[in-house]
Image: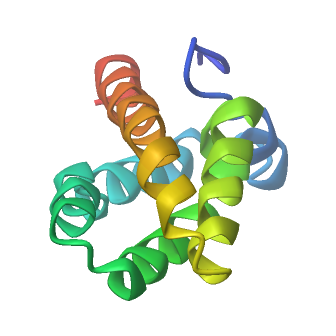
Amino acid sequence: MKTKGKYYNIEKLIHNTKGNSDFIKNLIDIFISKNSISVFEDLLEKKEFDKLSEQLHKIKSNLPYLASPEIADKVSKVYLLSLHKKYKKLTKDLPEVIVDLKNLVNELNEDFC
Protein backbone atom coordinates (compact mmCIF):
# COMPACT_ATOMS: atom_id res chain seq x y z
CA MET A 1 0.00 0.00 0.00
CA LYS A 2 1.34 3.39 -0.98
CA THR A 3 1.73 5.64 2.08
CA LYS A 4 2.63 9.00 0.56
CA GLY A 5 1.77 11.04 -2.46
CA LYS A 6 2.39 14.64 -3.33
CA TYR A 7 -0.72 15.73 -1.38
CA TYR A 8 -1.38 12.88 1.04
CA ASN A 9 0.45 11.05 3.80
CA ILE A 10 -1.37 8.16 5.46
CA GLU A 11 1.50 6.88 7.61
CA LYS A 12 -0.24 7.95 10.86
CA LEU A 13 -3.46 6.33 9.68
CA ILE A 14 -1.64 3.08 8.91
CA HIS A 15 0.04 3.15 12.32
CA ASN A 16 -3.18 3.91 14.22
CA THR A 17 -5.15 1.21 12.39
CA LYS A 18 -2.32 -1.33 12.66
CA GLY A 19 -2.24 -1.53 8.88
CA ASN A 20 -5.84 -2.70 8.43
CA SER A 21 -6.08 -1.96 4.70
CA ASP A 22 -9.85 -2.48 4.47
CA PHE A 23 -10.45 -0.03 7.30
CA ILE A 24 -8.00 2.48 5.79
CA LYS A 25 -9.66 2.29 2.38
CA ASN A 26 -13.07 2.70 4.00
CA LEU A 27 -11.92 5.83 5.88
CA ILE A 28 -10.47 7.28 2.68
CA ASP A 29 -13.72 6.54 0.82
CA ILE A 30 -15.72 8.28 3.55
CA PHE A 31 -13.39 11.28 3.53
CA ILE A 32 -13.67 11.64 -0.24
CA SER A 33 -17.44 11.21 -0.36
CA LYS A 34 -18.21 13.56 2.56
CA ASN A 35 -15.88 16.38 1.57
CA SER A 36 -17.20 18.17 -1.45
CA ILE A 37 -14.64 20.89 -2.00
CA SER A 38 -17.18 22.87 -4.02
CA VAL A 39 -18.89 23.65 -0.70
CA PHE A 40 -15.84 25.71 0.31
CA GLU A 41 -15.91 27.59 -2.98
CA ASP A 42 -19.63 28.32 -2.69
CA LEU A 43 -19.40 29.54 0.91
CA LEU A 44 -16.40 31.73 0.11
CA GLU A 45 -18.16 33.22 -2.91
CA LYS A 46 -21.27 33.94 -0.83
CA LYS A 47 -19.11 35.26 2.04
CA GLU A 48 -20.83 32.90 4.48
CA PHE A 49 -17.86 32.89 6.81
CA ASP A 50 -19.55 31.25 9.81
CA LYS A 51 -20.61 28.26 7.71
CA LEU A 52 -17.18 28.20 6.11
CA SER A 53 -15.61 28.03 9.57
CA GLU A 54 -17.86 25.07 10.44
CA GLN A 55 -16.81 23.22 7.29
CA LEU A 56 -13.13 23.91 7.94
CA HIS A 57 -13.55 22.61 11.48
CA LYS A 58 -15.14 19.39 10.19
CA ILE A 59 -12.38 18.67 7.72
CA LYS A 60 -9.33 19.72 9.75
CA SER A 61 -9.55 16.91 12.31
CA ASN A 62 -9.09 14.26 9.60
CA LEU A 63 -6.24 15.90 7.77
CA PRO A 64 -3.36 14.87 10.09
CA TYR A 65 -4.21 11.27 9.14
CA LEU A 66 -4.74 11.80 5.41
CA ALA A 67 -3.08 14.94 4.10
CA SER A 68 0.51 15.99 3.80
CA PRO A 69 1.64 18.01 6.83
CA GLU A 70 1.75 21.14 4.65
CA ILE A 71 -1.91 20.86 3.67
CA ALA A 72 -3.02 20.04 7.21
CA ASP A 73 -1.11 23.10 8.44
CA LYS A 74 -2.62 25.38 5.77
CA VAL A 75 -6.15 24.25 6.65
CA SER A 76 -5.49 24.84 10.36
CA LYS A 77 -4.23 28.34 9.58
CA VAL A 78 -7.26 29.32 7.49
CA TYR A 79 -9.51 27.79 10.14
CA LEU A 80 -7.91 30.05 12.75
CA LEU A 81 -8.40 33.03 10.43
CA SER A 82 -12.08 32.16 10.24
CA LEU A 83 -12.37 31.81 14.02
CA HIS A 84 -10.72 35.19 14.57
CA LYS A 85 -12.91 36.73 11.86
CA LYS A 86 -9.93 37.81 9.77
CA TYR A 87 -12.01 37.56 6.64
CA LYS A 88 -9.82 39.66 4.34
CA LYS A 89 -6.83 37.37 4.91
CA LEU A 90 -9.08 34.31 4.80
CA THR A 91 -10.49 35.40 1.44
CA LYS A 92 -6.93 35.82 0.16
CA ASP A 93 -5.52 32.53 1.50
CA LEU A 94 -8.42 30.11 1.12
CA PRO A 95 -8.40 29.74 -2.69
CA GLU A 96 -4.91 28.18 -2.55
CA VAL A 97 -6.07 25.83 0.21
CA ILE A 98 -9.10 24.84 -1.88
CA VAL A 99 -6.79 23.92 -4.78
CA ASP A 100 -4.67 21.82 -2.41
CA LEU A 101 -7.77 20.06 -1.05
CA LYS A 102 -8.99 19.32 -4.58
CA ASN A 103 -5.59 17.88 -5.41
CA LEU A 104 -5.63 15.82 -2.20
CA VAL A 105 -9.05 14.34 -2.98
CA ASN A 106 -8.06 13.65 -6.60
CA GLU A 107 -4.82 11.96 -5.58
CA LEU A 108 -6.52 9.83 -2.92
CA ASN A 109 -9.16 8.90 -5.49
CA GLU A 110 -6.53 7.88 -8.04
CA ASP A 111 -4.44 5.85 -5.61
CA PHE A 112 -7.13 4.20 -3.45
CA CYS A 113 -10.48 4.14 -5.25
Judged left or right of residue 54, residue 102 is left
Which of the 4 image quadrants contains residue 40? bottom left
- Whether residue 61 appears in this view of the structure is no
Residue 106 vertical position relative to residue 32 in the rendered view, above or below? above
Measuring from the top left, give residue 104's x and y in whole percent: 44, 30
Residue 50 vertical position relative to residue 29 in the rendered view, above or below? below
The one nearer the camera, 108 or 68, is: 68
Task: Name the image quarter holding the C terminus.
Answer: top left
Which of the 4 image quadrants contains residue 81? bottom right
Measuring from the top left, give residue 18's x and y in whole percent: 80, 47
- Whether residue 69 appears in this view of the structure is yes
Measuring from the top left, give residue 103's x and y in whole percent: 37, 25
The one nearer the camera, 25 or 52, is: 52
Q: Residue at x 42, y 54 (%)?
A: 91
Residue 16 vertical position relative to residue 109 in the rendered view, above or below? below
Task: Name the image quarter holding the N terminus.
Answer: top right
